[in-house]
Image: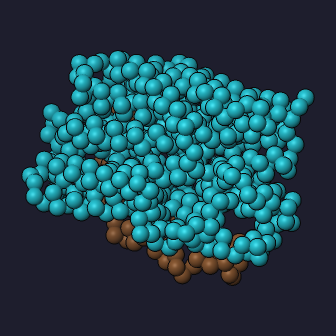
Amino acid sequence: MQRPALSSILLGLIPFVAGCFTVTLWDRIHPMVLGLPFNFFWTISWMVLTPLCLWGAYRIEIRRDLARLREQGGLPNGMQGGAD
Amino acid sequence: MSPSVVALTVISVIVAVGSAIGFSARYGRRMDLEQWACAGRGLGLVLVWLLMAGEMFTAYTFLGASGWAYSRGAPVFYVVGYWPLGCVVGFFILPLIWEAGHKHRMQTQADFFQVRFGSKFLAASVALLGVVSLIPYMQLQLTGLGLIVEEASYGGIHRTTAMVVAFALVAAFVFVSGVRGVAWVSVLKDLLLLGSAVFIGLAVPHIYFGGIGRMFTAIERAKPAHLVLPGNTLNLGHAWYISTVLVSALSFYMWPHFFAATFTAKNGQILRRNAALMPLYALAIPFMLFVGFTAVLVLPGLRDGDLSVLLIVRKTFPAWFLGLIGGAGALTAMVAAAIQLLCAATLYAKNLIRPIFAPKMTEGQVAALSKLIVLVLTAGAVLLAIYSSVSLISLYLLGVNGVAQMLPGVLLGLFSRRATTAGVFAGLITGVVIAAALTLTNHDPFHGLNAGFLGLCINFAVTGVVSALTRVHVTGFDAIPAELATVQPSSAAGLQ
């Protein structure tokens, strides 16, 4: 079993910092964006930005899976198609 | 025809079509436990996505979130905030859970604990905690169904009657179709739900205020405190927001039915892509919140915020449209309740009754017992729904406080070589006791912090300390002795 790479974990931490820990910084009504109070706009934007971060992490993990595959000379468990 | 007859007819047609899809999905498949509870582990990206996403859109998102937007205001943004973060957690742990599940033929969340920590009592406790935490979540769905029918009939059908009818429908649905049927009904229900959410989310603010921006400006002028934390509450401030978002995100996939849905995937990559895309699906939630916020000024003084969507739709649109929205909501609640029931019943029979009380049961008997338990659990949830009056989101958070306590066992089980059975067991019990004690004595939030979050922190600490003092059972999934490698003599029929 392979642990995730540090770089992909860091990518995954970005939404946590932006959407959770920093709430005191963005919990306000103004400036209103697209007609939404700023706090509402901010949380909604992380619904779109989080998949971008995870897409980056996905690329990193796929590259590691392929490297592992080359090393072992066979398909890793996570990439087999269908049940046994 | 009176408006209530029109609305109820549309709802019945939608529910009937949905049930027919569920019933027909079983044709040509033998329904052993593996098929009924795991769909034989053969679901691809689309069906796994629908199953998981389908389970995320429940009466909680459809009625409860807008209910909080109406009654509490800004604290409801936590729903928007935790969702993407839950997906981040899933992105990292689901492929590992899948890998362990695939290798050791797991069917339930408790199987994971059974294999990794080698204790049937720990597994049974996890199963029990899962079932107990699922009960308020099921109660939430049934309450939602009751509200929909009551409002669509303009008060003609009492919600108690509606909930009893809903009970019969959901139980029959689960009995016959199993997990694959539920996944297919999710398709219909999600189309209806997404369509209606976007439509009413844009139309309702437009009709009353001329747009979403003007609606929020109007709320700001009338009630500026409604739109920033703690909103229309005294104690749901920034510390509550952070702790609630954290505990909800971390326990996103700790719900036993999500955890078990992991095992239905063909491979781990599907789960990673699934988790990366899932936040986009949640974009429907803000639209439901727009409706709840509009109701703040249009329908002031409702005794129950959870009614805000239904009442504003009834006030604004013709009866057939209320039926359409009600039908979407009813199907949503039914599908959600069905998945939860399916999972709770399997957990109960497989990880609690059989290993502790009746070790000689066959796989077929477990499947039969599971179906019996489906009836008992739905009846229990109906009774609770009839006799309690907590808001839908509070019911959800009650369940979250419980399932969150499984996190240390899962995380340390995957990543730590030093976690011991005794450590995980002690942490789990301490966490549950603390979360339950604070919640049941009305101390949630406790000094501004979410009770489940406090329980989780202490749970981690106790797990760490007790693990350091006790002997390691095995160091990880790689190190499990061959004779303990699979959970049960698994049914070969589902694998052919």
Judge by depth and name the residue closer to the eye, B286 or B195: B286
Judge by depth and name the residue closer to the eye, B113 or B400: B400
**Residue under the point 40% across and 54% down:** B441
Task: Answer above or below: position of B342 versus B305.
Answer: above
Q: On the rendered structure, is B215 left or right of B375? A: right
Q: On the rendered structure, is B462 left or right of B394? A: left
Task: Answer above or below: position of B138 versus B207.
Answer: above
- Give how far across and how far down residue B422 sits, in percent: 16, 49
Residue at the extreme front: B441
Q: How is the image coloured?
A: by chain
Judge by depth and name the residue closer to the eye, B326 or B39: B326
Residue B258 falls in image quadrant: top left
Residue B73 falls in image quadrant: bottom right
Residue at the extreme right: B1
Residue B213 appears in view: no
- Give how far across and how far down residue B93 sits, in percent: 37, 54
Judge by depth and name the residue closer to the eye, B71 or A23: B71
Which chain corresponds to the colour cyan?
B
Task: Answer above or below: position of B139 versus A76.
Answer: above
Q: Classify the position of the C terminus of chain B by image quarter.
A: top left
- Give how far across and how far down residue A46 sits, in percent: 57, 68
- Give how far across and how far down residue B216 sits, in percent: 75, 70
**Residue under the point 61% across and 45% down:** B59
The total number of labels drawn is 0
**Residue under the point 28% across and 19% down:** B361
Tell me the shade of chain A: brown
Q: Classify the position of the N terminus of chain B by image quarter.
A: top right
